[in-house]
Amino acid sequence: MNFSLSAIVLTAILATGFLSVSHPKSSPASCDHGRKLHVTPDSSLKIHFRNDFLIGTALNVSEIEEKEPEASRLIAAQFNAITPENIMKCEVIQPGWNEYHFDLADKFVAYGKKHDMFIVGHTLIWHSQLSPFVKNIQSGDSLLLFMTNHINTVAGRYAGKVNSWDVVNEALNEDGTLRNSIFLEKLGPDYIRKAFELAAKAAPGAELYYNDYNIEQPKKRAGVIALVKKLKASGTRIDGIGIQGHWSTKGPSLEDIENSILEYSALGLKVSFTELDLTCLPNPWDLQGAEVSQNFKNSPFMNPYPHGLPDSVQLKLANCYEALFKLFIKHKVKIERITFWGVSDSQSWLNNWPIYGRTNYPLLFDRNYKPKPAFEKVMALKD
Ligand code: G3I
């Protein structure tokens, strides 16, 4: 997404005074100086795009347990697909060989059924957030036993309830080669095929996705395509590719994203944007991707907007989301789902990564669960 263009657009718009301001309930950190938004109460993303693609969000524990009434109202009104942000990951759901914690996952699935949502399971096999007992496994046989038990037990429990699984998450390096992990070390490259094979048996009715970040980038995209072709050649079911979409107001290019949609769907696969958010804050080195093990020092430079987003950046964010959704609409027949990685700015992992304790604004709803200009721009599309 070549945003130098939006800089030009931004200057032009500011010159014409596009944005008029009045917003009675503004609070410094969440609202931007009282912007008038043309959003009616029933402005709903899921309704607006009901003939195009699903609109999803990632839920944290308090949202799953409906502890925040405003969040619950917003989620039910805006979204028709849900992904668990953390509670179905290995370290949470299987802390021991024969120890499973299904309480939160059961609540998550029940929440989805109650609100008639498309339910995504995230994620069965991932090198990160593994339980310590898995990290200490020494033999390939033991690791294969873990994978078999984990997938059969977790995906099996929600067979017929979870609609789509992120079967394998983030298994590639930026150059498209296989990421080193305990799975690759102990089981070799075939672990990916094995994971999809196990998931297909445990959850015959669920879609099976490969999910990763930066797979809109040409080199990494080539790695995904090679992986898919290998799975298909072995007769192993894979139904979709999840492009996470942890992006910024600086990129990636729309061209790379469009080419990814075209090339992945040309493999006969569904394409979803599974963890969409656009950071508005400087990155320590404009680092690549979402590898959570990185961390850096906070400073006023790295946390420039603790009390609200300047109009210029707010509009840049709005233009970026508008440009993205124009592309999604153009390719709606190839796109199954657009999931935002969080409900509102207050929940975003990007407030604590890659630097802890920043104030970020990467989503469509602010810290008061109010729609932002980006929401308005996206909703204005298609009218
Ligand atoms: O639950 C513990 C809590 O008990 C403890 O007090 C607290 C303090 O350390 O940590 C809590 O666990 C945190 C967990 O989120 C729940 O909030 C972990 O430290 C923290 O690392 C974890 O971060 C999650 C991250 O994945 C971990 O890998 C983020 O919320 C989540 O948004 C993020 O999501 C990933 C996707 O799964 C895969 N793609 C990239 C994406 C962003 O990294």
Image: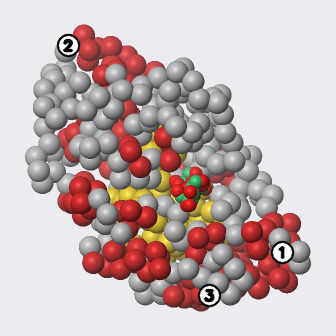
* Image position, residue 295 (x, y; %): 67, 39
Q: Secondary structure at mark 1?
A: loop
Q: Nearer the viewer, mark 2 or mark 1?
A: 1
- Dot placed on the residue nearer the N-terminal end, 2 or 1: 2
Q: Secondary structure at mark 2?
A: helix
The furthest residue to the right: 139
Q: Amino acid at mark 3?
A: Asn
The answer, for residue 26, to whether it is visible in the render is yes
Residue at horizontal 31 percent and vertical 41 percent from the top: 366
Location of residue 368 with respect to 232 vertically, above or below? above
Which image quadrant shows ligand 1? Answer: bottom right
Is 107 in front, or is 43? Answer: 107
Q: Is residue 22 left or right of residue 84?
A: left
CA distance for labels 2 and 1: 63 Å
CA distance for labels 3 and 1: 19 Å
Q: Which residue is mark 1?
A: 137
Location of residue 264 with respect to 252 vertically, above or below? below
Count of numbered circles in the view = 3
Indicate if the residue with disc 1 has its beta carbon within 8 Å of ligand 1. Answer: no
Q: Which residue is mark 2?
A: 16
Q: Is residue 105 left or right of residue 34?
A: right
- Dot placed on the residue nearer the N-terminal end, 2 or 3: 2
Q: Amino acid at mark 1?
A: Ile
